[in-house]
Amino acid sequence: MVRGNRGLTVGILLVFVCFLVSFAVGCSSKAGTGAIAGSGIGALAGQIIGHDTTSTLIGAGIGTGVGYIIGNEMDKKEAAQRQVAKTFAPLGGTTWKIVSITPANKVPKFASKTVVFQNDGKVVTTTVYPNKSKDVTTENYRVTGNTLIINRRGYLVNYKFNIKGNKMVATAQKVKITLKRLK
């Protein structure tokens, strides 16, 4: 009986130390936080299952590994999301109305033209013609510095663009497009 109580005391002490360390040190990554939390949970589970110090330490070791793996996968997912946001910034999630295209003879006459830059690298252009017919075109895009790269099978266009307030001007190959931000 005394041995079981001693093991429980050691297990509780290990869990307490793990939590103290996590609060004192802190972690800049989910992998580190997961490892610390996993070690505490594993130590507690090991103590409950085995009722001795060896079980507590084995549980802490397994919990550390599992917690690290889970946290590391979360870190990777966040890094990928940041990279995606960076690739499409500052246009991702915005909607624009084309105000003018110069020279005008480069495109068929239209009543309105809106451009939606999605957060998934797709740009959807909806054109309404004077006869009320509509055309929707989906292309791929990405942003590198002040260059907007739009492509679809068979072509690729690099636009230099500048945004001031709710106005964007994009130029490429003797074409200038002025857009007004809708949202």
Image: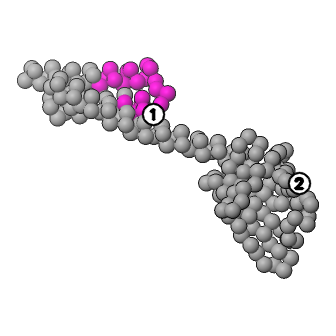
Instruction: State which tag comes first along the sequence, 1 or 2.
Output: 1
- Side (left or right) of 66 relative to 1: right
Specify the quadrant that holds the N terminus. Answer: top left
Quadrant of residue 118 within the rendered picture: bottom right
Real-space Cα distance between discs 1 and 2? 49 Å
Q: Amino acid at mark 1?
A: Lys
Quadrant of residue 94 within the rendered picture: bottom right
Query: Is residue 25 part of the magenta span, yes or no?
Result: yes
Residue sitting nearer the eye, 65 or 22: 65
Residue lying at 25% horizontally and 24% vertically, measured from the top left: 12
Comparing marks 1 and 2, which lies closer to the viewer? 2
Point out which mark residue 174 bears. 2
Quadrant of residue 44 within the rendered picture: top left
Label 2: state its secondary structure: loop
Label 1: state its secondary structure: helix
Callout 1–callout 2 Cβ contact below 8 Å: no
Residue lying at 42% horizontally and 29% vertically, measured from the top left: 32
Residue lying at 64% horizontally and 54% vertically, measured from the top left: 121
Q: Residue furthest left?
A: 1
- Look at the image and tell me whether residue 118 can be seen: no
Specify the quadrant that holds the C terminus. Answer: bottom right
- Side (left or right) of 62 relative to 170: left
What range of the chain is rendered magenta?
15-35
On the image, the x and y values in percent for residue 132 come to 81, 78
Q: Which residue is mark 1?
A: 30
Residue sitting nearer the eye, 136 or 67: 136
Q: Residues within 10 Å of mark 2 (few under 14, many from 20)?
A: few
- Look at the image and tell me whether residue 181 can be seen: yes
On the image, the x and y values in percent for residue 67 come to 35, 35
Q: Main secondary structure of the magenta part?
A: helix
